[in-house]
Image: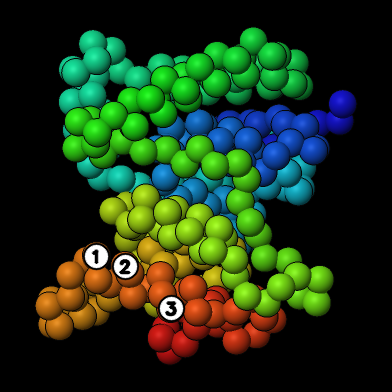
Amino acid sequence: MATKLIYFTVNGTPEQAEFLVDCPAEDVKDLFRCAAEAGPHAILKLYNPKGNIINISPSLEPNSPTSCYKLEVVAADSNSEPLAAELAGALGFDLSSMEKRLQGLEKNILIEAGETPAVVYEMKKQVDSFQEKLESVEHLSWLGLFKDLSEGTHKPSPFYHKRTLHKTRKECEHVREKFLQMSSLEVSEEVRQYLKTPTFDNWQWEDAEIMVLLQVMYTDLDFIAAFNIEPEVLQQFLFEVYRRYNNIPFHNFKHCFLSPRW
């Protein structure tokens, strides 16, 4: 089957990723997440040689080693390492390390063979299943474990006449869950500064990521302290704003996000 070969750098280190042209978008993101050694809820952005953000998806344009893309983790969980250490101590082994090793193995196989053998998928399935069991145990919830195991994500379509204008409950809950998972991420200073510029490209950010950026804006403008806003209240407010915007071409949630920036 046809594959794509993408050249990019992570922290200045050259990397390459090869995946099937019809590979699911989440699998492509996981491949880049593995290369960046990022957590399951970290926000990654890919930049082209001109410095513009491009979507991490199967539609990525193949490039060459002389025109590498740049991969950056723009928001990461600052508490992930202590939690991982506590989990490793409780279990006797590091589950996240095991998962990273498995992702690395999958990445190498993809590069060498162009496809992932069934045995690797089965191994990954077993690791995910084990982690899901751990996360469902109530007494382990204090460790902060969670991984989005839902299949696929809903992406707005430009053909608005072919879909309902109102968001479905399932769609809203999926975005809300993703936002809450990301809400504790530490957004990089580079993105915070970029957020203040008129050239900020909101179309390359998902709705859950936009809510994280709105939360950053409230924090940086000192609104939370000035008005004594509880984090949970702010997060629920941002979600309710998102939920009430319809899927229309112009006055949508992304337009809402642009307004307070001015």
Mark 1: which secondary structure?
helix
Q: Which residue is mark 3?
A: 241
Of residues 231 and 163, the one drawn nearer to the viewer in this rendering: 163
Mark 2: which secondary structure?
helix
Q: Amino acid at mark 1?
A: Glu
Q: Quadrant of residue 221?
A: bottom left
Classify 10 Å Cα crowding around label 1: few (below 14), some (14-19), many (20 and above).
few
Q: Which residue is mark 2?
A: 235
Residue 236 lies, in percent from the top left, at 33, 69
Asked if residue 194 can be seen in this view, the reply is: no
Q: CA distance from mark 1 to mark 3?
A: 14 Å
Residue 136 lies, in percent from the top left, at 34, 32
Q: Which residue is mark 1?
A: 232
| In this view, 260 is above or below 219 | below
State if disc 2 and disc 1 touch (CB < 8 Å).
Answer: yes
Q: Is residue 238 left or right of residue 52?
A: left
Q: How is the image coloured?
A: rainbow
State if disc 2 and disc 3 touch (CB < 8 Å).
Answer: no
Classify 10 Å Cα crowding around label 3: few (below 14), some (14-19), many (20 and above).
few
Q: Amino acid at mark 2?
A: Gln
